[in-house]
Every structure is written in C-alpha cells, then in structure tokens.
C-alpha cells in the first residue's frame, strides 16, 4: 500500500522532461512513483491552451485550488487584533472565548484560540501562563502548634457555600530571599488584594490585612488562612478567623488558585524589594479585570462592585 503524497514542483519538472522526450504518461507514472491517472489528471488540470504544460504555472494553479478548498482561519482581521490585545492582557484562551461570547463580539471556541496561538507560538505562546510548562511539586507545610484557634469546621455554612461577599481567604506567597506578598481573595467574587510584607512580625501582618480589606469599603465577615506562623495572631483581627487543617491546601482553594495566577507575574526568583512602586497594584488590577469561567466570564471587579465593564468591546 503506497503512502499518499501530492505532486510537487520537482515532480512536475520530471513530468515536463518526460513529455518533451515523448514518453507515454503511463510510463511517466511508473518512473516517478504515481498512478497513471494522477499524471493524466495533473496535466489536464494545469496545462494552458497557449503554452501547454509548464511546471511553474502548473504548481501555481494547483496551490490556488488547494487553498480554495481549505477552510479559512476563523481568527483574522479585526477579530485577530482583539484576540492579540486580550492575550496581551494575560487572558487565557478560555477566558477570551467566554468573554467575547458574553459581550457579543464573536462566538469562537477556546480550542480555536489555542490553535491560533500554536500557529504563532514563537510570538504569542509566551502570553499564556502555562505555555509548555509542567506542574510543580508542593513543599510540605510546616506544622505549627496553636492555642485558642478556631478550625475551619466551625466556619459558617454561608461562607462555605460562597453565598455572600465578604468571606476572605489569605495566604503568603514567597518570592526570592523568603520575602512574601500577602494575598487576600474573596471567596465568592475572587476579588483580590495584594501587598508586600515588609516586616516579619505577626502584628504587622494583622495590621496589613486590616488595611487591605478596609480599602474595599465592604464589611469583612470571615477570614480563612493556613497554619503558617505568620498568621498565628489572626484572632486579633476584627473579623472571625478560621484555620485550615494542616496539610490540606484544598480547604483554601480560592487563594491557592489566585497564587497560581500570580506566578505569571511573580516567580520564586523575583526579588520583591526591587519591584517598582505600584507594580503590585498593577498586577492586582489585571487579576480583578480578568474574566473568570466560574463567574460566567464576568470579572471579579464587576461581581464585587456590582458593575458591568465592556472589556471585550473596548479592545
């Protein structure tokens, strides 16, 4: 069984030479590895009335027919520009497809966006958070002995079910030299607040948390965090604080997912002391204006503030 292959320019040059020598078409097919019907068909479809069969013109005509019978790329023109702008804002293909459909810009699948990125991988692949990356392992959380703390099992049902705004999760994200960024994320809306931890004292983290959440101008109902030593003074906050079970990161999955998104901007090797002023705030705005599938492709900002922003239309 022969493998299928198309007639190339080099094949047509051989066909032309055999024709000039008066070789029968059936013999030409045997010599260059094609069935005789392929030779007859290629000559009949690509010869010109005046000049007959010429390899350059025959190849050009065959290429035109090949392109006409193929589906055109879905992402082109103005839609291509919008997709590029969305990728520049660090949206994922799924977020692009979902938000564009929500605002009536275009109806495309996220697989279409992925294929578009793959066609332009060297230019656009770096815009994706996990372009050609594998998952990283998790460091084992240190056990910390605690006294007078409230476990997550006592957290209100409304907070567990994400029924209201004001139930927060917080965690510290490490950069280089064991420096940390304080990450606070609302469970219902995924609205995120960031700040660099300048001091290692526990009391400063409690004050920093209060300052961050007070800036949202919404009542803080609960705070959930892990068993890290930086949070051992959690009960001193005005809102009730609940501690997860040791070595159970899935109990604070919202903030863990947010940290995963932050790794697109802040790596383990990033020196937080060298970040320019306002960099964390710019990252915070990007995250809060990024459409989320779990929010029906609304943004955390829109859900948290009950507003609508025409993001896709403005691109």
Image (cartoon, helix red, strand yellow):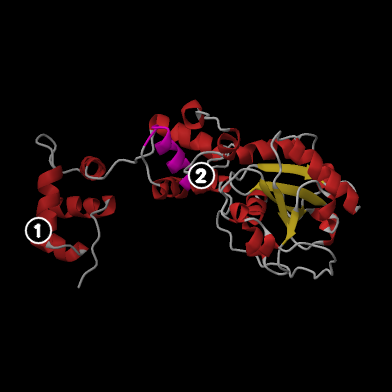
**Residue lying at 46% horizontally and 38% vertically, measured from the top left:** 99
Q: Is residue 138 left or right of residue 315?
A: right
**Which residues lie in the magenta part?**
94-106
Residue 27 position within the rendered picture, expressed as x and y whole percent measured from the top left: 11, 63
Mark 1 or mark 2, earlier in chain: 1
- Cα distance between the residues tagged 1 and 2: 58 Å
Name the mark on residue 159. none
Q: Secondary structure at mark 1?
A: helix
Q: Does the residue at mark 1 contact the one at mark 2 (Cβ under 8 Å)?
A: no
Q: In the rendered image, which residue does mark 2 sit on?
A: 295
- Closer to viewer: mark 1 or mark 2: 2
Q: At 52% from the left edge and 37% from the top edge, which residue is drawn? A: 86
Outermost residue toward the top?
Answer: 314
**Residue name at image x 49 percent, y 47 percent:** 293
Which residue matches tag 1? 37
**Residue 163 percent coordinates (x, y):** 56, 48
């Amino acid at each position: 069984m022969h493998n299928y292959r198309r007639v190339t320019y080099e094949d047509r040059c051989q066909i032309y030479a055999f024709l000039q020598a008066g070789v029968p078409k059936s013999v030409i097919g045997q010599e260059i590895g094609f069935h005789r019907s392929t030779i007859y068909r290629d000559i009949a479809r690509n010869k010109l009335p005046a000049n007959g069969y010429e390899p350059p013109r025959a190849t050009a005509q065959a290429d035109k027919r090949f392109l006409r019978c193929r589906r055109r790329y879905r992402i082109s023109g103005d839609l291509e520009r919008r997709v590029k702008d969305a990728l520049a804002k660090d949206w994922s293909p799924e977020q692009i497809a979902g938000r564009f459909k929500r605002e009536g810009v275009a109806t495309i699948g996220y697989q279409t966006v992925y294929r578009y990125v793959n066609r332009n991988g060297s230019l656009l692949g770096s815009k994706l958070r996990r372009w050609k990356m594998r998952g990283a392992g998790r460091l084992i959380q240190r056990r910390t002995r605690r006294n007078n703390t409230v476990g997550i099992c006592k957290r209100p049902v409304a907070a567990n079910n994400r029924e209201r705004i004001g139930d927060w999760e917080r965690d510290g994200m490490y950069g280089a030299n064991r420096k940390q960024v304080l990450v606070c994320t609302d469970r219902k809306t995924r609205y995120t607040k960031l700040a660099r931890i300048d001091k290692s004292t526990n009391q400063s983290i409690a004050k920093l948390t209060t300052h961050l959440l007070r800036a949202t101008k919404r009542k803080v109902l609960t705070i959930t965090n892990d068993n890290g030593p930086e949070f051992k003074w959690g009960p001193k906050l005005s809102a009730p604080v609940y501690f997860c079970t040791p070595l159970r990161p899935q109990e604070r999955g919202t903030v863990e997912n947010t940290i995963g998104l932050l790794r697109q901007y802040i790596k383990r090797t990033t020196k937080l002391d060298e970040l320019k002023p306002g960099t964390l705030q710019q990252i915070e705005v990007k995250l809060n204006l990024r459409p989320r599938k779990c929010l029906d492709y609304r943004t955390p900002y829109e859900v948290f503030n009950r507003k609508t922003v025409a993001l896709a239309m403005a691109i």
